Image (cartoon, grey):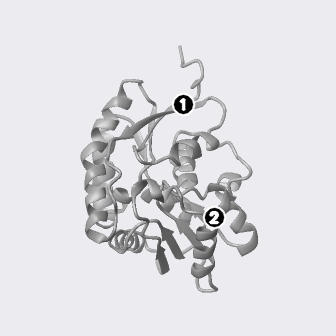
Amino acid sequence: MTDHLGYRKKFGTLGPSTNTIVQPDFDDLRPAGVTNHYSRIAIPNNPVTDDASFLALVENINKATLDAVDILKTCEMDYLVMGMSAATFWNGRAGAQSYLDMMTQRAGVGVSCGSFATEAALNALKVKRIAFLSPYFKVANDQVRRFYQDCGFTVVRDVCFERPSPVQIAHSTDAMCRDAIKQLNGDDVDAIVQVGTNLSMIRLAAAAELFLGKPVIAINTATYWHALRSCGITDRQAGFGSLLEHH
């Protein structure tokens, strides 16, 4: 017997309780026969004003993540899709691998997370020189840069929005993201990556690809794509960029 609606896969998905973007984004990316079951990582919506307060935010997320995973295990999920990204980039590729191993052991199923999903996407798209944008502060962008460099990519430029609270990340506008893409783009960049799962760019990234003529990877798209492909689901989907359309 299989789940009546999730007859292909039941995805457990999680994100900070302040995150209002990743759940609807993942639902928009969901093919028939796959269901998403969301668990919230309970954190306060504290102001974020500098590197120190951003580190406190990451620590709050880390403290509550495993509890959210344990809740998801009760629905007998087939696979875990992580809708939070900053912590998945921490301490280089080796540190990120240790974090992923911990999450996989706790979940008892396979796991897709933003860091390794975007790495896989960049490799699938055969690009090496990248630029990236985030809603983070510099301390987190430095960790993202280190991860990608450890993976063998050249990071040419990056932008951080320094959003003033976790909830305010979701209030970032298309204009802000569009201006950041323009700032990051150049002949020396093969692809642009957006990190930060509470920043919705799954449609804007797809539109930007049409005008820039190069990949623009939204982290929510890449993470969900990685989960689908890891589970043997190869459906192509239009409207969310070259990754889901062609890979």
The residue sitting at 28% across, 43% down in the picture is: 64
Give 11 or 168, whichever is nearer the viewer. 168
Q: Residue at label 1?
A: 9
The residue sitting at 24% across, 47% down in the picture is: 63
> Quadrant location of residue 115?
bottom left
Q: Secondary structure at mark 1?
A: strand
Give 215 or 19, whichever is nearer the viewer. 19
Residue 125 - label: none
Above-or-below relation of 243 to 211: above
- Is residue 87 in view? yes
Q: Residue 58 placed where, x, y %?
A: 30, 57
Q: Nearer the viewer, mark 1 or mark 2?
A: 2
Residue occupying the far bottom of the picture: 187
- Is residue 126 in view? no
Q: Residue 191 placed where, x, y %?
A: 59, 73
Q: Residue 187 placed where, x, y %?
A: 64, 86
Circle 2: residue type: Asp
Q: Residue at label 2?
A: 174
